[in-house]
Image (cartoon, grey):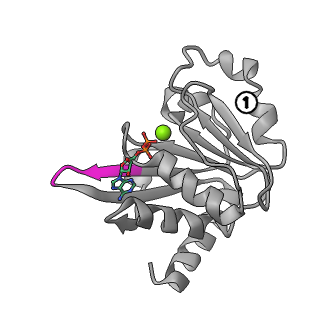
Amino acid sequence: MDAASFATVARTTSAEQTKQVAACLATCLQPDDVILFTGDLGAGKTQFVQGVAAQLGVADAVTSPTFNILVSYEGGRLPLHHFDLYRLEDPEELDDIAFYETVEGGGASFVEWSEKFPDHMPEDALHIDLGVDLEHPDHRVIRAFAEGFRASQLLEGWKEALQKEGA
Ligand code: ADP
Ligand code: MG
């Protein structure tokens, strides 16, 4: 995966709009889908997952899992697993937190700070990069790159859903 593989999926001008773009993706999610985020602190990764959760029908408030590393939400259309790998130091710790079992356990997984362990992430995954526009503090560029068959399907479905939405 290199930066050139990413293509712009949407541009947003508010956190609310980022959640709407995320909700479009959520309509296409299937069991065991994996989304690997890149993007700086404050880029909007957690906001994005909040938009997903709302569309899936998760009742609980989604907060940053930085201190828990993994927070799972049941009660939506499918289980939602929200990882934040920021505090992990060694890829072996992925086993300690049951990372692989969890992502293969029938839910949809969203991984913040996946770039810490690029060689240890699931092979079939949708990469989403959130970029901040320094001149416009509330603007974000949402770019994506599909790696693998299922991720490609997911990306196509997401783009169709965005078109229908007029987003
Ligand atoms: P991350 O998880 O990437 O560190 P968060 O989602 O926790 O980032 O925080 C993003 C912050 O940026 C929130 O305070 C949100 O309100 C703000 N924000 C401003 N504009 C946008 C936008 N267009 N999309 C997403 N978040 C935005
Ligand atoms: Mg976050």
Q: Residue at x 84, y 42 (%)?
A: 105
The extreme front residue here reads 60
Position in image of residue 101 (x %, y %): 81, 33
* Residue placed under numbered mark 1 in the picture: 99
Q: Main secondary structure of the magenta part?
A: strand
Depth check, front residue: 1 or 105: 105
Depth check, front residue: 123 or 77: 77
Q: Quadrant of residue 136?
A: bottom left
Name the image quarter holding the C terminus. Answer: bottom left
Q: Residue at x 74, y 17 (%)?
A: 96
Horizontal side of residue 101 vs 18, given as left or right = right
Depth check, front residue: 156 or 22: 22
Position in image of residue 9 (x %, y %): 44, 66
Q: Quadrant of residue 66?
A: top right
Tell me, yes or no, whether the highlighted magenta stretch contains residue 40.
no
- Tell me the amino acid under the disc marked 1: Phe
The crowd level at tag 1 (other Cα within 10 Å; few <14, some 14-19, many 20+) is some
**Residue 146 in the image: above or below residue 88:** below
The extreme left residue here reads 135
Tell me, yes or no, whether the highlighted magenta stretch contains residue 132.
yes
Horizontal side of residue 118 vs 11, given as left or right = right
Q: Residue at x 54, y 62 (%)?
A: 22
**Residue 152 in the image: above or below residue 97:** below
- Please report the bounds of the magenta region as a residue range: 130-135
**Residue 99 in the image: above or below residue 123:** above
Horizontal side of residue 34 vs 38, given as left or right = right
Position in image of residue 39 (x %, y %): 40, 42
Q: Residue at x 37, y 46 (%)?
A: 43
Element marked by disc 1: helix
Count of numbered circles on the image: 1
